Amino acid sequence: MGTGLSVDRILASLEEQRAFHKERETFHAAQAELHREQQALHAAEYERVTQHYEAFKASAGAAAELAARALPAEPEPSAPEKPREEEALPPRMPRSRLVEKVVAELPARMEFGPAWLAQEINRRFGRQLPRPVSSRLVSNHLRQMAARGRLQIARRGTAHREAWYRSV
């Protein structure tokens, strides 16, 4: 069973292994001390948070009972509003008329941008259009409507931010 190693190489290898394992033992002893300190710190914080949690839970329950007595009974929730179905379009209706139609149905003083309006038009009329309405087309028409006084500009647009309009 010859390894072909000299006595000096064997001793050097064993010395390296001893140094490595001594260093790792020292490292892990330091880590164990650090972990014990962290464990003690977290245990103390856990106790402190638990005390505050229990105190808050008790006072919040009592406060909720008081608040419930002072409030009138809640009305029953109404049925959720159904999403609008797609509307039928006359053949070959200009896209600008679609913009005007949707803007006319918006509540007064509502603010919106061309991207939202294009999305709304595509949601309502998308299956009937040969291709989706772009926000650029909507933006151009909204700018014309604002110039004619049919919309107010709520926020001017820039090269990197779309304009917002307000229905009148």
Image (cartoon, grey):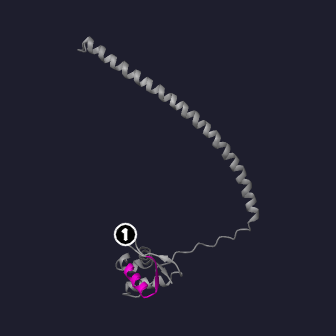
Q: Is residue 104 visible?
A: yes
The stretch in magenta equals 138-155
Residue 95 figure quarter: bottom left
Please count the marks in the image.
1
The quadrant holding residue 51 is: top right
Q: Residue furthest left?
A: 4
Res 128 quadrant in image: bottom left
The residue lying at 57 percent from left, 74 percent from top is: 81
Q: Which residue is mark 1?
A: 160
Is residue 60 placed above or below 80 in the rendered structure? above
Query: What residue is rendered at 27% in x and 11% in y?
Result: 7
Q: Position of residue 87 (x, y in %)?
A: 46, 82
Residue 134 can be seen, yes or no:
no
Q: What amino acid is found at the position of numbered circle 1 in the picture? A: His
- The vertical placement of 72 against 84, above or below, is above
Classed neighbour count for the residue bearing mark 1: other residues with Cα under 10 Å, few (<14), some (14–19), many (≥20): few
